[in-house]
Image (cartoon, helix red, strand yellow):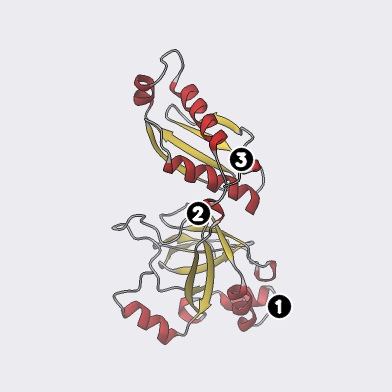
């Protein structure tokens, strides 16, 4: 595999408390920065150093959590655990090669739009001078990159939504949004994996379970996945829900 020039430059690193550090890989949210984040996170997970706990990818950075005591007893005690981990990460980044992180999994997410499952579909249409069918068409034509998972277990931060269906958040958030609800907030679209308060404009709902605590990994979507939404009828939604195997 060819070396990835975008990851050969040693990035900025800064401490996060006494047992974690942040690797800053960019300043803008875009696919290029995301690729750097994905490559670094994948490499560290696949090549953990003694004391490594986990790493968490975000929009432009990767947070690395570690055991300070393990680091202290495993390496040169003349340096702090933070300094040791910085050095280990620098060495790892020098070894990085491109390839695996470029491969993206596409996940199809069926959605029943409008009605009781998408009470704000009409609002989104009116705000953008569109019909509800046009909103659905635009939303399902997009291909969305999962930049990161956060806010709630399994909640995907997606990029790639058309500005033609952008809509502001509600001024007063709903107290509880049902799991599976598909919403729009500003230039973003996303899916609520669990019931939680929220202010997004709800345009539909998927029967798929995004948060699966008994499985490994416990979330359907992962950073780096591509998401395609496909419209289904209310009857199809109900059939999905009734099926035992409504998990991809």
- Cα distance in 3D space between marks 2 and 3: 18 Å
Q: What residue is rendered at 49% in x and 22% in y?
A: 83
Mark 1 neighbour density, 10 Å: few (under 14) some (14–19) many (20 or more): few
- Residue at the disc numbered 1: 129
Q: Relative to the observer, which residue lies in front, 114 or 155?
A: 155
- Residue at the disc numbered 3: 7
Horizontal side, residue 224 vs residue 12: left or right = left
Of the two numbered discs 1 and 3 on the same chain, state the one appearing first in sequence. Answer: 3
- Foreground mark, 1 or 2, reads 2
- Helix or strand or loop: what does disc 1 sit on? loop
- Cα distance in 3D space between marks 1 and 3: 43 Å
Compared to residue 77, the image places residue 87 above or below, namely: below
Position of residue 28 measured from the top left corner of the image (x, y, whole percent): 67, 47
Mark 3 neighbour density, 10 Å: few (under 14) some (14–19) many (20 or more): many
- Cα distance in 3D space between marks 1 and 2: 33 Å
In which quadrant will I find the C terminus?
bottom left
Compared to residue 23, the image places residue 224 above or below, namely: below
Q: What residue is rendered at 66% in x and 77% in y?
A: 126
Report the disc number at residue 223. Answer: 2
Q: Is residue 202 visible?
A: no
Of the two numbered discs 1 and 2 on the same chain, state the one appearing first in sequence. Answer: 1
Position of residue 34 measured from the top left corner of the image (x, y, whole percent): 59, 50
Position of residue 133 measured from the top left corner of the image (x, y, whole percent): 61, 83
Q: Is residue 220 visible?
A: yes
């Amino acid at each position: 595999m060819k070396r990835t020039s975008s990851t050969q430059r040693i990035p900025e690193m800064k401490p996060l408390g006494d047992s974690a550090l942040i690797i800053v890989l960019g300043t803008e949210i875009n696919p290029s920065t995301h690729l750097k984040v994905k490559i670094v996170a994948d490499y560290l997970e696949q090549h953990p150093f003694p004391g490594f706990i986990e790493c968490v990818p975000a929009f432009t950075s990767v947070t690395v959590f570690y055991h300070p005591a393990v680091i202290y007893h495993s390496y040169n005690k003349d340096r702090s655990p933070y300094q040791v981990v910085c050095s280990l990460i620098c060495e790892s980044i020098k070894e990085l090669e491109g390839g695996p992180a470029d491969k993206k999994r596409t996940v199809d997410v069926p959605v029943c739009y409008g009605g009781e499952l998408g009470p704000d579909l009409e609002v989104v249409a009116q705000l953008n001078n569109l019909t509800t069918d046009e909103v659905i068409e635009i939303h399902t034509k997009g291909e969305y990159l999962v930049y990161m998972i956060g806010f709630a277990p399994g909640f995907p931060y997606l990029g790639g939504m058309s500005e033609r269906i952008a809509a502001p958040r509600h001024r007063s958030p709903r107290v509880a949004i049902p799991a599976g609800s598909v919403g729009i907030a500003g230039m973003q679209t996303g899916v609520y994996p669990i019931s939680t308060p929220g202010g997004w404009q709800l345009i539909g709902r998927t029967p798929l379970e995004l948060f699966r605590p008994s499985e490994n990994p416990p979330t359907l979507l992962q950073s780096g996945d591509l998401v395609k939404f496909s419209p289904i009828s209310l009857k199809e939604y109900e059939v999905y829900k009734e099926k035992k195997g409504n998990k991809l």
